[in-house]
């Protein structure tokens, strides 16, 4: 079945450091790819998405590019802030019956220190 | 405000005592789903619903029931909770029909003693 593998952390960075969270997937067909973020005590929020190969999703300074050849969707940010401290989930959907189903990676907790 | 609401947010109960976690969305979404979140396992889908009166099992449906009598509501029912159902539960909804961005509720933290 479909699966998502991502860096699990936890990771601690200083403010203004660069961030990369690796995410690779296994899927039949052509999935849509997502990054969700979960701030402390809250539900998940969509951070960005890409629906086809070579698409780049971006939001709040974060970017990720859908790479079909490497089956990857790595999340990057050039300069993190304390407010980016959260758990980040890579996910895919769209390949199975009930195509809205999301398959998640295990999540990575990021802490950014001032 | 467009949102998904869940109640209760926190619940401590005992083994075998039936409980219901409610979920409601005000966005007229077709698709609704329940997930559980456990450390080291990420989120796993319990049940989903493509539309009113249409529900189906996700990856971990054992011990849970759902119903979809109205478009906006999708309650999760634990008929006889057990300690292994202690978890953080999220309800989510989306427009469906390929609009696969999902909107999540704030979560319900359930502890079964």
Image (cartoon, coloured by chain):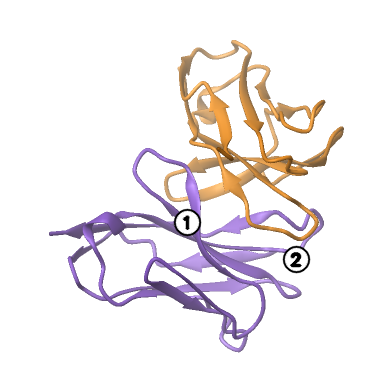
The N terminus of chain B lies in quadrant: top right
| Rendered view: A34 above or below A68 | above
Indicate the colour of chain B. Answer: orange
Residue B78 image position (x, y, % from top left): 65, 21
A28 and B80: which one is in front? Answer: A28
Q: Nearer the viewer, mark 1 or mark 2?
A: 2
Residue A108 image position (x, y, % from top left): 38, 59
Question: Mark 2 falls on what kind of element?
Answer: loop
Residue A27 image position (x, y, % from top left): 68, 71
B104 and A106: which one is in front? Answer: B104
Query: What residue sits 62% from the left and 51% below the top?
Result: B102
Place residue A66 in its image quadrant. Answer: bottom right
Letter of the purple chain: A
The C terminus of chain B lies in quadrant: top left
* Residue bearing the label numbered 1: A106
Residue A20 image position (x, y, % from top left): 35, 75
Query: What residue sits 87% from the left and 32% below the top?
Result: B53
Same chain under badges 1 and 2? The reply is: yes
The answer to which of marks 1 and 2 sits earlier in the sequence is 2
* Residue bearing the label numbered 2: A95
- Please indicate whether residue A79 sits to the left or right of residue B1 in the image: left
């Amino acid at each position: 079945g479909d699966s998502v593998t991502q860096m699990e952390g936890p990771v601690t960075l200083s403010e203004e450091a660069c961030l990369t969270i690796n995410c690779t997937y296994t899927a039949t067909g052509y999935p849509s790819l997502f990054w969700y973020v979960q701030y402390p005590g809250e539900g998940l929020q969509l951070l960005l998405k890409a629906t086809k190969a070579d698409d780049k999703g971006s939001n709040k300074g974060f970017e990720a590019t859908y790479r079909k050849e490497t089956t990857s969707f790595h999340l990057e940010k050039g300069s993190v802030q304390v407010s980016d401290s959260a758990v980040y989930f890579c996910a895919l959907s769209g390949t199975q019956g009930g195509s809205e189903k999301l398959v998640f990676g295990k999540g990575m907790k990021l802490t950014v220190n001032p | 405000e467009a949102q998904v609401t869940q109640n209760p947010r926190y619940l401590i109960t005992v083994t075998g005592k039936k409980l219901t976690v409610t979920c409601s969305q005000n966005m007229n979404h077709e698709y609704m789903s329940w997930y559980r979140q456990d450390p080291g396992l990420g989120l796993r889908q319990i049940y989903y619903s493509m539309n009113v009166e249409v529900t189906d099992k996700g990856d971990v449906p054992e011990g849970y029931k759902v119903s979809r009598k109205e478009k906006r509501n999708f309650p999760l029912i634990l008929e006889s909770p057990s300690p292994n159902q202690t978890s953080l539960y999220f309800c989510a909804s989306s427009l469906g029909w390929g609009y696969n961005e999902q909107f999540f509720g704030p979560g319900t933290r359930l502890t079964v003693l």
